[in-house]
Image (spheres, helix red, strand yellow):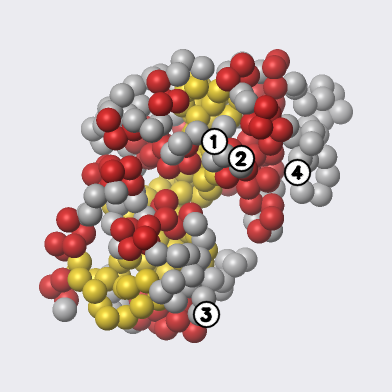
Amino acid sequence: MNPLLAKASWMDRDDIRPYVFVRPENQIAHPGSVHRLDWFEKSPVFKNPLDISEISFADRLYSLEERAFGPSNMAMPRWVFYDCAVMPGFVAGFAAKPSALTKEMREVLDPKKFPATGSPIKTSKVLKEVTSLDDMDWVPLSLFIIIPTMHKGEWVAHNLCSVNSLLPDGGLYGLGFLSKAFGLWYANVEQCSGMTQWGSPALKLHSHYGHLEVIGAYAPVHSHAKTITYRVQVNTNCWEKFFNKEPDLAFLENYGPTGKHIDPKSEESMLDFQHRIERHEGPFFLNAAEIAKKKLDEELMIYSLKQQY
């Protein structure tokens, strides 16, 4: 194993593997050929979302996602998952053999105990009840949804969650970060955009996949207007910084502080930042190392290319 992943010893286990939940037409032709990385040597488990026999795998994904995002009123309806994620893109993550699941994992992965918002999980009158965990071949532990866009080469990171956020002991070290990393690596993604909310712990994770450019600081079109929309040029050197905590010298060399800050607690601050973006005063960036060190509600310095200042 790469020494950077020493704490993620679960990556060496045979009963935990990456998976790709994708319809055959969307499979990547030459996976892992752009970003040279030795982190993901195991062949992934393939699941076809258009195959009815895989409904139990999908139900577990729904249950995991609902538990992660339901409290913030952002759980994804099944039709959105099918129409907007599975059909144009794919889902990736890690899955485990039932025998590898701890008691705590079983508790949070049981959709009978944690039904989707609105009504218990059910598929169709002609289908059986939700399959027992022990009757499954693989059980998903995380999910990362990524969707290609009309902008050539750009993908949108639509959703990311893992069982770790639901476990009191944190679960498998780095599971969420490595799930997104695997998806980006596997699909040869060179440019990735995404959205998260200001003050969310997710920003500490998403800022480590490449130098994070803020392309939207306020999003009234979104259900949650206090949303940051970001874009990164995928750079695996930044991934290493997530684990070794070393300074990103390339960021410090290319970007300098503008003297302006974004306050995650202030809607006015977000609007001011958004207006600067719309006036094409950028591009603007945030420093992943600063995000990692600061509290979620602390102000963050806004950076720009050094030659502009």
Task: Give the foreground label among 2 and 4.
Answer: 2
Give the residue at mark 1.
Answer: 171
Task: Give the foreground label among 1 and 3.
Answer: 1
Give the residue at mark 2.
Answer: 167
The residue under the point 57% across, 39% down is: 169
Q: Amino acid under label 4?
A: Ala
| Residue 200 versus residue 184 in the image, above or below | below
- Marks 2/4: CA distance? 19 Å
Q: Position of residue 106 (x, y in %)?
A: 68, 29
Q: Amino acid under label 2?
A: Leu
Q: Is residue 50 visible?
A: no
Q: Position of residue 232 (x, y in %)?
A: 32, 55
Q: Position of residue 229 (x, y in %)?
A: 44, 63
Give the residue at mark 4.
Answer: 116
Task: Give the foreground label among 3 and 2.
Answer: 2
Q: Earlier in the sequence, mark 1 or mark 3?
A: 1
In the rendered image, the quadrant that contains the C terminus is: bottom left
Residue 267's mark?
Answer: 3
Per the image, label 3 sits on a secondary structure element best described as: helix
Q: Are marks 2 and 1 in contact (CB under 8 Å)?
A: yes
Per the image, label 4 sits on a secondary structure element best described as: loop
Q: Amino acid under label 1?
A: Gly
Q: Are marks 1 and 3 in contact (CB under 8 Å)?
A: no
Q: Are marks 4 and 3 in contact (CB under 8 Å)?
A: no
